[in-house]
Amino acid sequence: MLKKIAPAIVLLLCVWVSHTALAQQPIIGTQPLTADDIVFKKEFSVGLKAHTHGFGASANLVRIQNIFKKKFIEIEVMNIKHPKERRQQSPYASGRNSARGYVFGKKNSFYTLNVNFGSIHTITNKGQRNGVQVSWFYGYGPSLGIVKPYYLELIYDVNERGGFITRNEKYTPENAAWFMNNGLILGSSGITYGWDDINLFPGFQLKGGFNFDWANFYEMVKAIEIGAMVNVHAGLVKNAEGDIQISRVPIMIEEQNSFIFTNLYLRLNLGRRK
């Protein structure tokens, strides 16, 4: 239960800190900064993210309004795993057989393309050349969910030399006896399979957190971002009777799937200001 609500707690904490921070003036040394101290107008950085259930990469364009506030637009691609995903190795893997590890019971892989708009507010600026600038931020925007079938290399027979005869297949009710049998799975087929059969699950993302920029020079961006994010996605599918209904994101076959994905994350941003 705590894992599920932890990202929401972090978001609430960010809101509370924001009210406190707005009442304070960022300072360098003992001198309060003012909006007239702005030197740079724009900032561009790229980021690599590790979150509770996956990874992501992003590009960030920031417009510096003044020393207190920045506006940003962020484009990000990431994957989201089901909490019950567990990667395992095929019993047939050996030095002679380079079978890939696989996730048992997985039906689809889930990726998101996020476009976030948000604001960054300075709490404390760099006190000196090697100081750390601390900011809080929030962002929100549309998110396009991409569901791609997960393929496994399934064992269907053995040839005269004792080798396996296999087929790369996604899950269907017809092949369930193979797909859901550990003894008949050689391994995953790889990320290249299934891109010609994707489904889209539109949604949105909300995030918030703190940014710590420790670059030695103001024109450089070297920052760690710590935060929480919430993605909400749903799709329209036909049921057995042919009626259209709202669908959860179908990542696993037998586990409970969801509309809502909450995660904590850590991201490294590198870039320049000008």
Image: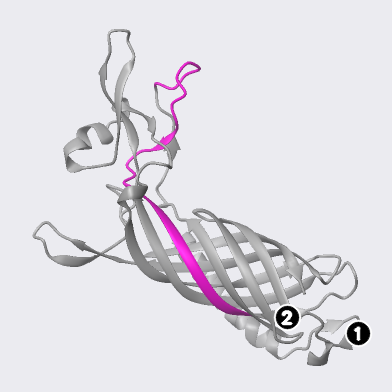
Colour mode of the rendering: one colour
Residue 202 in the image, given as x and y percentages of width and height: 36, 68
Q: Is residue 72 above or below residue 230?
A: below
Q: Residues within 10 Å of mark 1 (few under 14, many from 20)?
A: few
Quarter of image, res 26:
bottom right
Disc 1 target residue: 30
Secondary-structure class at tag 1 = loop
For the residue carrying disc 2, how many other residues have a C-alpha within 10 Å: few (<14), some (14-19), or many (20+)? many
Q: Is residue 70 left or right of residue 231?
A: right
Q: In the rendered image, which residue does mark 2 sit on?
A: 122
Q: Horizontal placement of 63 versus 235: left or right?
A: right
**Residue 74 drawn at (x, y percent):** 57, 70
As rendered, which of 50 and 2 lies closer to the eye? 50
- Quarter in which the N terminus is drawn: bottom left
Q: Label 2 to label 1, Cα distance in Å?
A: 16 Å
Query: What percent of the width, then of the height, locates residue 239?
Result: 15, 59
Q: Is residue 171 magenta?
A: no
Q: Nearer the viewer, mark 2 or mark 1?
A: 2
The secondary structure type at the circle numbered 2 is strand
Along the horizontal axis of the image, is 109 left or right of 34? left
Residue occupying the point 35% across, 51% down:
148
Q: Quadrant of the C terminus?
A: bottom right
Q: Residue furthest top?
A: 161
Q: Which residues are magenta?
A: 92-119
Residue 63 placement, left or right of 172: right
Q: Amino acid at mark 2?
A: Thr
Image-quadrant location for residue 122: bottom right
